[in-house]
Image: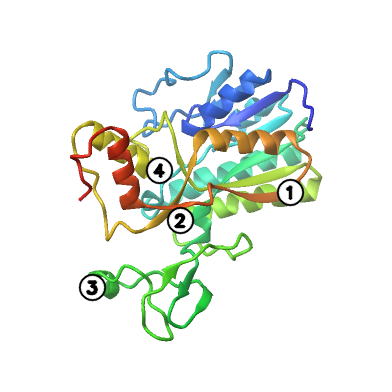
Amino acid sequence: MASMASMKILVTGGAGFIGSFLVDELVRRGHAVTIFDNLDPQVHPSGRPPAHLNPRARLIQGDVRDYQALRVAMEGAEAILHKASAVGVGQSQYQVKHYVDVNVSGTANLIDILVNHPHRVRKLIVAASMSSYGEGNYRCPLCRKDGLRPALRSDSQMAKGEWEPLCAGCGGAREPAPTAEGEKQNCNSVYATTKKTQEELVINYGRTYGVPSVALRYFNVYGPRQSLANPNTGVAAIFMSRIKHGQSPVIYEDGRQGRDFISVHDIVQANMLALEQDTGTHAIYNIGSGKPLAIQDLALLLAKIFSRGDIQPN
């Protein structure tokens, strides 16, 4: 697929933050794009397609939980970028059925259609999530042990303000360390569990039926078009909104939590490579910058960018 001619491509969730940028790039490259999106009111409060939606793409308003509607949208597609998901870690913990229905059953519908109905799909790409790793890797500077994957911090530890996981050996605070790509996934939320299941369903389908399939585990994506009403809106967008309105970014714990931030434009590039290249069939890739940034440092950086040095995070 390296020198790809124009294709018919379906983007589920194509009216959303990341999906809309993917649609723009696919259209720019000459592909015939169909968007399948339910225009979720939480993301699209007006219920109408967003103003930035590419007019050269065809929009079908529908839900991945609707088998027949999804089947119609998939007709004629030669590649599918499956981005439709219920997003947000916290919300998933009390909207369990909704997240499982959308993310797991919706993906199952897509695969069931591919398995049991004629199709022309020759590449399937799914949006996975770094959240499926769970708590990251740590090392103990005193015991000089690396590769420590701690459990979640206890309520008593949080109440004491002990923000870093403690070493089981010496009792000292561990420090963050890079997490190897081959580390076992250890989901700590319903959202993470459903995203892990999505990628496993897609890769299993691809291997079983010989259709090239790729899962891209996104890290913390930032960029324009993020809806502040979206429960998965990145901290960068939230901080910028507060700074632009003269409000201090709100920092939890000590602000030293490290995050890997990746531009939505880099996410688009990763998807294009996965779509157009033959390497990495049935593969899973982490899509991040590889450079951790502390939450407090992010707040200070954004204040500087907006020339609001008078605004300090609290």
> Residue at 75% across / 33% down in the picture?
121
Q: Amino acid type of disc 2?
A: Val
Q: Dot 2, crowdedness within 10 Å: few (<14), some or many (≥20)? A: many
Q: Secondary structure at mark 2?
A: helix
Circle 3 crowding by C-alpha within 10 Å: few under 14, some 14–19, many from 20: few
List the single residue furthest toward the top: 55
Query: Where is residue 282 shown, x and y percent of the image?
Result: 73, 49
Residue at image position (30%, 45%) is 299
Quadrant of the frame with the N terminus: top right
**Which residue is under mark 2?**
190
Viewer-side residue, 120 vs 260: 260
Label pair 4/1, CB-CB below 8 angstroms: no
Helix, strand, or loop for circle 1?
A: loop
Which residue matches tag 4? 232
Does label 3 or label 2 sit earlier along the sequence?
Answer: 3
The numbered dot on residue 282 is: 1
Estimate the spatial distance between the alpha carbons at disc 4 and disc 2, rounded to whole Å. Answer: 14 Å
Badge 4 amino acid: Asn
User: Which callout, 4 or 2, points to the residue nearer the camera?
Assistant: 4
Are the residues flagged by discs 4 and 2 in contact, CB closer than 8 Å? no
N-terminal of the pair, mark 4 or mark 3, is 3
Whole-angstrom CA distance, mark 4 to mark 1, is 27 Å
| Proximity of marks 3 and 1: CB atoms separated by less than 8 Å | no
Identified by mark 1, the residue type is His
